[in-house]
Image (cartoon, rainbow, N blue to C red):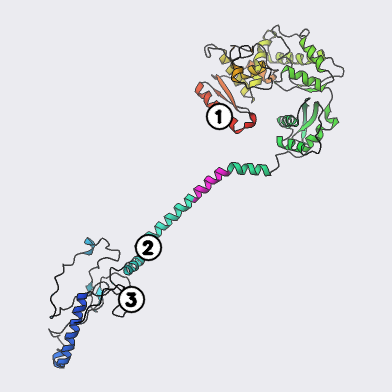
Amino acid sequence: MAKSPPENPDPNPSGGTGDTPLPSRRALREAQAAREAQAAQKDAGPAASEPAASEPAASEPAAPPAPLSYWTAPVQPDPDEQPAPEEPAAVSTSDHNPFAGLGFGTAPDPAPASDGQLTGAPDVPAQAGRPGSRANRRARLADHPTLVEKKSRKGGWGCLVVILVLVALMGAAALALQGPISQLVAATQAPEDYEGSGSGEVLVMIHDGDTGSDIANTLVDQDVVKSYDAFYDLLLAQSTDPVFQPGAYQLASQMSAQAALEALQDPDSRQDLTVVIPEGTAAVDVLTSMSEGTDIPLEDLQAAAADLSGFGLPAEATSLEGFLFPATYTFQPATSAHDALKTLVDRQFEALDTAGVAPADRWKTIVMASLIQREAGLKDDYYKVARVFYNRLDPAQWDTGLLQSDATVAYGTGKTHLVTTTDAERADVDNAYNTYVHPGLPVGPISNPGDLAIDAALHPADGTWLFFVTWNLDTGETIFSTTVDEHDAGVAKWLDWMDEHPEYG
């Protein structure tokens, strides 16, 4: 009896092509026995080997089984062989095969067809080797549409996740680089500047000792040039340092930096005997400006200001502070120091009379207005600042009566250009203007107020505010609060702004 070939998943003993699986050892033995029996019948003679055409002989061996997709069909047992152990009955693959429907594992239950082939096998190409071999499993997995579709979906989701991660990383990188990129762009671009010679008329005061930086700030404040850098960078680019004479200069609004520089160096632009006094200027600075804009010596102006007789000031006044109305003045040649100062005082009385302030109320009105003038920024805020101070003077709303104005403390220290103070300065009881330790209005005016501040002192806004903080020193935006918590939040916002603008110290 021929031996069964070894179980080898790669060679195909039949010599055929395709993926038809090999029959089992038992099936091969049975097929070999059938062939030997058929050969023996042929040797016995045609009578014995050819049964009637109408009916096959009962002893005729079965034809060789047709090849199956998974297993071979059973054949007649070899009488010379011992019967093989009875195999268990076939069970439904869908009940016991965990891979049912995936095209591998146990075979489906084929049914014989009329042409001798079996039906019901999966519609996949015939495969060579053992049914459970790795090659067959890979082939079936590759041809299974459901598995291919799932693999495709997983790949699509994976690509989407990768893209989203990359987009998120790019966004984070863009945010992180936004500041450096903005600085780089700003550094490579020219500063903002107006074009041409501007329009209208603007009187600009240049003071003795002003640096190029001081002049650039003055021009920006009065909207003569568009940016500080436009003018200051132009000064630095000059082959020789420009020299500016103190005094008032006739310029225009929105000039180019070059045009403004040329006008300031033109002697015809300088206005003789003209003085420009901004709102909120302290008396000591008013005297300096008058000397620079006229031919009156500063010593003469200081002496005239010390003698209060002849000015008609309220009895409480100890200086001209608060009564030198801020405006632009042009004096006649040879005007005396006293007459020049009286011109400013008379103009302040005119402003008070126009606002409806009685002579008896001039003092307290000027004191409050001078405080508002130094503390307020934007126009509408003047009336809110006035309300805060009036609320603090009301014992029912603020029992300490302390106005706690930094501007008053700074004035008492002689720092007339500042509104910021230190802890030590705010604790100084020897400073008569220190409203952190002395309740009520300060002992006198701290600046020379204009019409707006006077009107705010007379007509404060309605509100319950007790605090305010100017959080943006560039724009003058101010936060008004009623409670301590609200005010603390406003202070935190101001501190954040200061961190971003270290140039303000």
> Whole-Å distance between the Cαs marked 3 and 1?
80 Å
Q: Is residue 503 left or right of residue 123?
A: right
Q: Is residue 20 left or right of residue 248?
A: left
Residue type highlighted by circle 3: Gly
**Magenta stretch bounds:** 166-177
Locate the C terminus by quadrant. top right
Q: Residue 422: x and y, percent? A: 61, 21
- Helix, strand, or loop for circle 1? helix
Question: Mark 1 sits on what residue?
Answer: 493
Residue type highlighted by circle 2: Val
Question: Mark 2 sits on what residue?
Answer: 148
Question: Mark 3 sits on what residue?
Answer: 18
Q: Residue 124: x and y, percent? A: 32, 70
Crowd tier of the residue under label 1, counting other residues whose Cα lies within 10 Å: few below 14, some 14–19, many 20 or above: some
- Residue 130 vs residue 165, the one in the foreground: 130
The residue that appears at 69% across and 15% down in the rendered structure is: 355
